[in-house]
């Protein structure tokens, strides 16, 4: 058993420098290779996640501005429709008033023309009555001359 323990002791004694070299290599590689790579990967991850977050924030802001523009356009359209409707109503009122004025003026002119025509008819009747009497006399004298 002493030989076994002695052999085990020799194996461990020969393996200790390798163990320490592997341990030293582990810490050296960890400090010079793995930590910088880990830092680089973390920075890449942060950059991609940050870029995605910035992009999603930009998309959200763009959607918000688009919604604001849409509301503003909708408001402007309703305002334009309202103003147009007011102008249309005012124009309708103005046209109705104009038509009423023109109708009154036409009725006045028609009434004046009717009066003028009635006067002309009365004058013509008077003239016809006067002429009728002279024609009647001429006819009667002509008939009486023939009979006599």
Image (spheres, grey):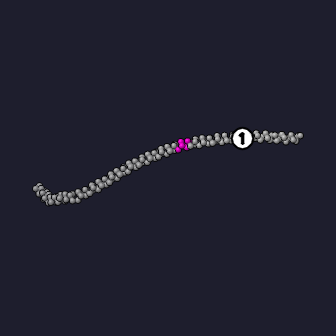
- Residue name at image x 76 percent, y 40 percent: 130
Residue that protrudes farthest toward the left in the picture: 2
- Residue name at image x 19 percent, y 57 percent: 27
Q: Main secondary structure of the magenta part?
A: helix
* Residue 121 % position (x, y): 71, 41
**Tag 1 residue:** 123
Residue that protrudes farthest toward the right in the picture: 148
Residue 15 appears anywhere in the view:
no
* Element type at mark 1: helix
* Residue 24 % position (x, y): 17, 59
- Residue name at image x 77 percent, y 41 percent: 131
Quadrant where the image shows the N terminus? bottom left
Q: Nearer the viewer, residue 13 or 79?
A: 79
Quadrant where the image shows the C terminus? top right
Q: Is 3 inside the magenta-drawn segment?
A: no
Magenta residues?
Answer: 91-97
Say left or right for 90 vs 16: right
Q: Nearer the viewer, residue 144 or 33?
A: 144
Give the answer, above or below, for where 24 lies relative to 128.
below
* Residue 79 % position (x, y): 45, 45
Give the answer, above or below, for where 40 lies relative to 69.
below
Q: Nearer the viewer, residue 26 or 91?
A: 91
* Residue 82 % position (x, y): 47, 44
Q: Residues within 10 Å of mark 1 (few under 14, many from 20)?
A: few
Say left or right for 119 vs 43: right
């Amino acid at each position: 058993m002493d030989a076994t323990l002695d052999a085990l002791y020799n194996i461990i004694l020969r393996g200790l420098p390798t163990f320490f070299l592997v341990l030293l290599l582990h810490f050296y590689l960890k400090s010079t290779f793995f930590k910088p790579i880990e830092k680089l990967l973390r920075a890449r991850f942060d950059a991609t996640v940050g870029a995605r977050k910035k992009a999603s924030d930009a998309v959200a802001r763009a959607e918000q501005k688009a919604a604001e523009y849409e509301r503003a356009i909708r408001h402007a359209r309703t305002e334009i429709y309202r103003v147009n409707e007011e102008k249309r109503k005012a124009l309708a009122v103005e046209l109705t008033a104009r038509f009423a004025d023109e109708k009154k003026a036409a009725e006045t002119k028609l009434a004046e023309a009717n009066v003028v025509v009635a006067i002309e008819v009365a004058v013509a009747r008077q003239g016809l009555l006067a002429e009728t009497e002279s024609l009647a006399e001429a006819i009667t004298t002509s008939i009486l001359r023939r009979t006599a």
